[in-house]
Amino acid sequence: MSQPIRVVVADDEPLARSGVAELVRRDPECSVVAECADGSATVETVNRLRPDLLLLDVQMPELDGFGVLQRLDPDSVPAVIFITAYDQFAVQAFQVHALDYLVKPFDDRRFTEALTRAKSALRQDRGELTRRLTGLLEQLAGREDSRFLSRIVVRVAGHVRFVRVEELDWIEAADYCAKLHSAGRVHVIRESLQALEARLDPARFFRVHRSAIVNLDRVRELEPYLKGDHLVILQDGTKLKLSRTRRAELEARLGQTI
């Protein structure tokens, strides 16, 4: 391929998106032709620009990465590198069908490996890339609950660990990261609380205020606090402030009135 590889980067988190775009720009064989902040913009941009390669975050609100692929014009579907904190099923599917995938958090070396593989594949059989992507979409289409996470990928000292969502007690916002609290342990992942919330089953998880999501199965009681405020008490004794704007909804979810 004599012309630069034309790349679109799609991620709803500004810092993550700009960071990935900068890594692409370091490669003289690649050119970033657009950056997209949501799924709808990604669909429009890819259909219009027809890039060679799409670096696609799976966990985007409203229209996620899989929704993007399903809405693309079949004639404009590019090669795809997924960026994900998705569950084990999806990781296995990526290994079988996708060009490559990056599990957050990833380092520069792993990114370079993925981009090198993409460049090599694009110089060879584009038809094979299309067949693999079609296979992935067919496999995901048969999974009823693919829109919700069942496991979260955590990297610890170079190892990959899968934390089952039902084992979570609560999740705490930490800048552009999130802290997963589970059985007295804390795991930090490079994922915003908003992105995680969009991928968690709302029947099980509830955002008590802007910086915390709780597993409703872990809620032990609600405790009056100062000036009409309340605290959510978890089974392990953790106390989290309940936003006044969220109080009525939590009452309804728990089936009780404070």
Image (cartoon, helix red, strand yellow):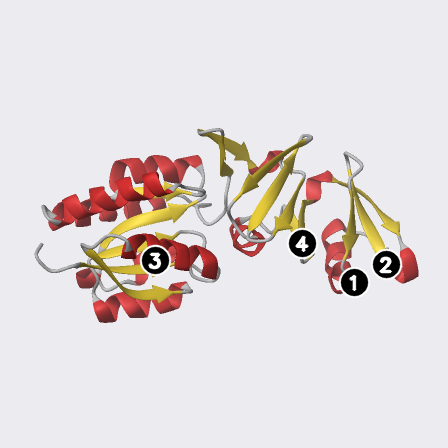
Q: Are marks 2 and 1 in contact (CB under 8 Å)?
A: yes
**Mark closest to the chain's N terminus, 3 or 1:** 3
Q: Could you tell whether 230 is left or right of 27 in the image?
A: right
- For disc 1, the marked residue is 244
**Mark closest to the chain's N terminus, 1 or 4:** 4
**Mark closest to the chain's N terminus, 2 or 1:** 2
What residue is shown at x 15% (from left), y 45% (from top)? 121
Name the secondary structure under disc 4: loop
Q: Is residue 180 visible?
A: yes
Quarter of image, res 211:
bottom right
Crowd band around label 3 with a 10 angstrom C-alpha radius: few (<14), some (14–19), many (20+): many
Vertically, is 68 above or below 205? Answer: below
- For disc 4, the marked residue is 211
- For disc 2, the marked residue is 229
Crowd band around label 4 with a 10 angstrom C-alpha radius: few (<14), some (14–19), many (20+): some
What residue is shown at x 45% (from left), y 39% (from top)? 87
Vertically, is 38 above or below 236? Answer: below
Residue 234: % across, % down: 77, 40
Which quadrant holds the N terminus?
A: bottom left
Amino acid type, residue under disc 4 in the picture: Ser
The disc at residue 21 is: 3
* Front-most of residues 192 and 146: 192
